[in-house]
Amino acid sequence: MPLSLQRRAFLAALAATVVRPGAAHAAPATGESRSDMAEQLAGYVDSVHYTDLSPAVVELARSHFIDAIGCAIAAFNEAPVRAVRDVALTVPGGVATILGTNRRTTLEWATFANGGAIRHFDLNDVYAGRETGHPSDNIAPCLAVAEAEGRSGQELILAIVLAYEIDCRLLDTVRISARGWDHPNFSLPAAALAAGKLMRLPPPQLAEAVNLAIAGHLAPNQTRVQVMSNWKGLADADAARNAVFAAQLARGGITGPAPIFEGDAGFFKQVSGPFTLDIDQFGGRSGSFRLAACSIKFYPAQAHTQTAILAAVKIAHEIGDLGRIQSIAVDTTQPGFAYTAGEPAKWAPETSETADHSLPYIVVRAMLDGEITVHSYTPEALHDPRALALMKTLTVKEDPALTRLYPQKIPNRVTVTLEDGRVLSEQVDELPGLPGRPMTRDDVEAKFRMGVKGIWGEQQTRDFLDYAWNLDQAREVSGLSRHMVVGG
């Protein structure tokens, strides 16, 4: 339930009494910046309103929201998703619903459980800047807080757009994975600011939410190297959980370390190196919203493998008998090689989490099956002798010409040499949903239906889609949960 008016007044009064020496209200020294980056981001988020969103941006937000929910429901019965949900539902009471159920838990646990479900199959959307991330991981905290606070569909959409904007703009700045850090570190401020926007925090408290979110919750990149674990699909959910926690603390008047980005032991020094953000170019100011540059995945696989799947399927269809293959060569981008073929584990995947990030495995699996689905990573599929034999013939290398097309396109080329010496090659640069080719409503619904098939019936699917396509008309988003109960 939303906080009472009395409780809101108490927290607002409490927050107003907390002033840190040297904080935003202090007069800057001559030549000194008037605000740190956390304060600048807070001011930006506070200044953007629903009326700043074009109809096209609203439509995109609805599409990405539908896609994220479809990914979560598709994963409802998967063991890691079920395990997290079971733990979350041991917490009595609560204010936010676990997706697929009619039961509520705390904001933090709902955010974590729902975020893990959205991310589980590696089927949710993606953004490729200097770092690659999954901005729809920030939908779970937005939905949980919007429900708990009794917010409207328009407020939820605005929070989602802002979370994408902050996350993607940070992903554009620097490759923190090269320094040993994971991309959910950029989700920390994005989710904290989106949650704070839904809590209607003023700019000083929004800035404190950023300070608190980053200060205690940095994520190492070990999550995505060597043998990958269940945590690969939960790390961003954990960032969102911590961000919601930070926003609640900020609303209660708690301050965090500052300046969290520029400080002597802050984010720049410890994680990213220095960078700048031109907030005047952000969406709602003079620039376009980064949501428009995000991709909805066509296949449940790492973003840089998407076009390789279609290339592999096409070339396998042309070959017919795969026993005629002598060798397979895959040319990809520099990020594609680094993320999907640059370490030994990607050449002998033992877990689904590693396999869906393995370009060698994904290419041969697509050639064998004619597709990649959520069933492509079972233990039987991973140890299929046919796949293992084909992988021994396969090589992957970067093609600088393909790298130059990135990130506007995410190209891959698959070349097969047959036993008779004939060479066949197929290059795919883009798919529906990737940059430059946004999915239509029909595309979004087709993918959604594929995910929820066998879990929801047709009437439930249609009811949800009707509600979600009109999300901006909802006075309170709490009515959405009744359309999403599995088996109910």
Image: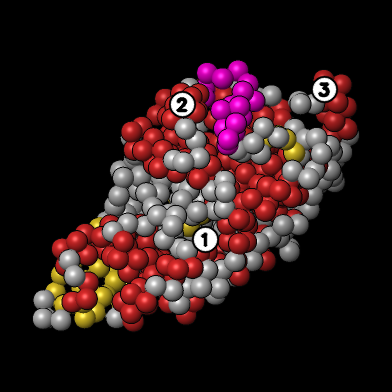
Q: Are marks 2 and 3 in contact (CB under 8 Å)?
A: no
Q: Position of residue 242 (x, y in %)?
A: 72, 49
| Range shown magenta | 471-488
Question: What amino acid is labelled 2 in the image?
Answer: Gln
Identify residue for label 2.
459
Q: Amino acid at mark 1?
A: Val
User: How would you rate the neighbour count of disc 1 (Cα within 10 Å): few for under 14, some for 14-19, many for 20 or more?
Assistant: some
* Residue 169 spot, x, y in % from top left: 51, 48
Query: Along the line of sight, which residue is nearer the eye, 157 or 306?
Result: 306
* Residue occupying image coordinates x 87% and y 21%: 6
Disc 1 to disc 3, how far (Cα)?
42 Å
- Report, in whole angstroms, how far the alpha carbon at label 2 lies from the one at label 1: 45 Å
Q: Is residue 108 visible?
A: no
Decide: is 330 above or below 264: below
Q: Secondary structure at mark 2?
A: helix
Against 313, residue 351 (above or below) is below
Residue 411, how many percent across, how many down? 30, 60
Dot 2 or dot 1: first in sequence order is: 1
State which quarter of the image contains the C terminus: top right
Q: Which residue is mark 3?
A: 4
Q: What residue type is disc 3 on? A: Ser
Q: Which residue is mark 1?
A: 174
Q: Is residue 283 magenta?
A: no
* Rendered residue at 52%/68% (across/down): 351
Q: Is residue 159 above or below residue 389?
A: above
213 left or right of 54? right
Check if mark 2's residue and mark 1's residue have beta carbons within 8 Å.
Answer: no
Q: Position of residue 173 (x, y in %)?
A: 51, 56
